[in-house]
């Protein structure tokens, strides 16, 4: 008797909720569907090597508007040819609010130094690159016929550091880094960290000036992943810690006269 009453109660409750749902304009499905887990939220078994799909985050309007304002103020300084890119942030740490695609640096004389391919980077990083090119790279390359173009190896790229699975997010993933493959002179010469004809003195200037202006500079000898390009970024670290790791090639030994080196008394003698 009790069971029959309970069954009757359940039926009444179902009918009442169905009636309410119909009144609210809802169509009741025949079976109640379970909520579908998005791939990003799906539980993962240990050792599951399948790629995880990142989820785009919602950016507060005031944040994207403030960042766009900063970018516009940088563009208005007329130091580069660039387009402001939309804000995008992913739940895996990739993306940036306030970024631009920069295709050339403008010089005060009206000349443009092209970036090939164009680079997607945060607006403040883009300005730092433009300042470095205008104030350091252009004067440093004057003796070599002048700077014509910068060949870019990478800019924004959502990936862990050095593409190592499980490593921390690269500054490239935050649109905060630029990899330079080579710099091209007006006479067509192409200089880079692994290009043999590159003057060591010029490489030294690139290293000195970039290490002064960027918080991370990595080149050959840093970690084995920067042997054919150099990396610049503006990562913020605790205590203002900076990283400048870039070994210059060892200059060839000057030809020696074995006799003169062997006898110290001859060192002061004027060369005949
Ligand atoms: Zn890099």
Image: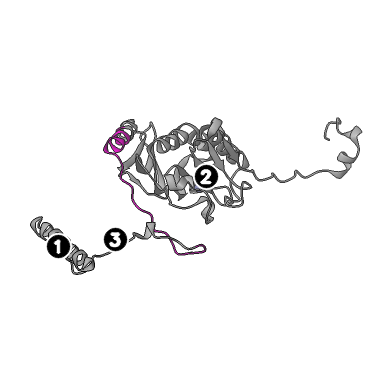
The percent position of residue 47, horizontal first and vertical second, equals: 52, 64
Q: Which residue does the image show at 62% across and 46% down from the upper left?
A: 222
The percent position of residue 208, horizontal first and vertical second, equals: 58, 34
- Callout 2: CB less than 8 Å from ligand 1: yes
Choose top left, top right, bottom left or bottom right for residue 113.
top left
The mark found on residue 265 in the picture is: none
Label located before the other in sequence (3 or 2): 3
Compared with residue 11, is residue 62 higher up or lower down, i.e. above or below? above
The mark found on residue 12 in the picture is: 1
Asked whether, in this view, residue 269 is left or right of residue 153, the answer is right
Query: Quick one: 35 or 247, which is closer to the camera?
Result: 35
Query: Counting other residues with Cα less than 10 Å from the Cα at mark 3, is it few (<14), some (14-19), or many (20 or more)?
Result: few
Label located before the other in sequence (1 or 2): 1
The percent position of residue 217, horizontal first and vertical second, equals: 55, 40
Please tell me whether mark 1 or mark 2 is closer to you in this view.
1
Label 2: which residue? 231
Q: Which residue does the image show at 54% across and 55% down from the upper left?
A: 164
Q: Is residue 209 magenta?
A: no
- Find the distance from the CA under tag 3 to the CA under tag 2: 45 Å
Dot 3: what SS?
A: loop
Quadrant of the snapshot with the C terminus: top right
Residue 181 appears anywhere in the view: no
Quadrant of the snapshot with the N terminus: bottom left
The mark found on residue 35 in the picture is: 3
Please tell me whether mark 3 or mark 2 is closer to you in this view.
3
Label located before the other in sequence (1 or 3): 1
Query: Quick one: 165 or 180, which is closer to the camera?
Result: 165
- Find the distance from the CA under tag 1 to the CA under tag 2: 70 Å
Dominant secondary structure of the residues highlighted in magenta in the image: loop
Specify the color scheme.
one colour
Which residues are the magenta region? 46-69
């Amino acid at each position: 008797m009790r069971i029959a009453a309970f069954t009757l109660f359940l039926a009444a409750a179902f009918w009442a909720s169905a009636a309410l749902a119909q009144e609210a304009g809802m169509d009741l499905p025949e079976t109640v569907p379970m909520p579908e887990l998005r791939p990003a939220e799906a539980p993962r078994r240990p050792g599951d090597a399948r790629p995880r799909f990142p989820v785009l985050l919602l950016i507060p309007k005031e944040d994207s508007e403030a960042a766009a304002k900063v970018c516009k103020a940088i563009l208005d300084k007329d130091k580069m040819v660039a387009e402001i890119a939309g804000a995008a942030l992913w739940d895996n740490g990739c993306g940036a609010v306030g970024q631009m695609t920069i295709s050339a640096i403008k010089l005060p004389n009206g000349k443009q130094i092209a970036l090939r391919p164009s680079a997607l980077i945060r607006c403040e990083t883009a300005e730092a690159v433009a300042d470095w090119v205008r104030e350091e790279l252009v004067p440093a390359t004057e003796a070599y016929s002048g700077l014509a173009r910068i060949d870019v190896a990478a800019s924004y790229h959502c990936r862990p550091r050095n593409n190592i699975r499980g490593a921390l997010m690269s500054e490239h993933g935050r649109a905060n880094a630029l990899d330079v493959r080579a710099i091209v002179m007006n006479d067509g010469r192409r200089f880079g960290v692994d290009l043999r004809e590159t003057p060591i003195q010029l490489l030294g200037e690139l290293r000195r000036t970039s290490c002064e202006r960027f918080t991370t500079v990595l080149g050959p000898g840093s970690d084995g992943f920067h042997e054919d390009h150099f990396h610049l970024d503006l990562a913020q670290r605790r205590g203002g810690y900076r990283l400048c790791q870039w070994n210059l090639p060892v200059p060839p030994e000057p030809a020696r006269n074995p006799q003169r080196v062997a006898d110290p008394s001859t060192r002061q003698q004027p060369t005949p």
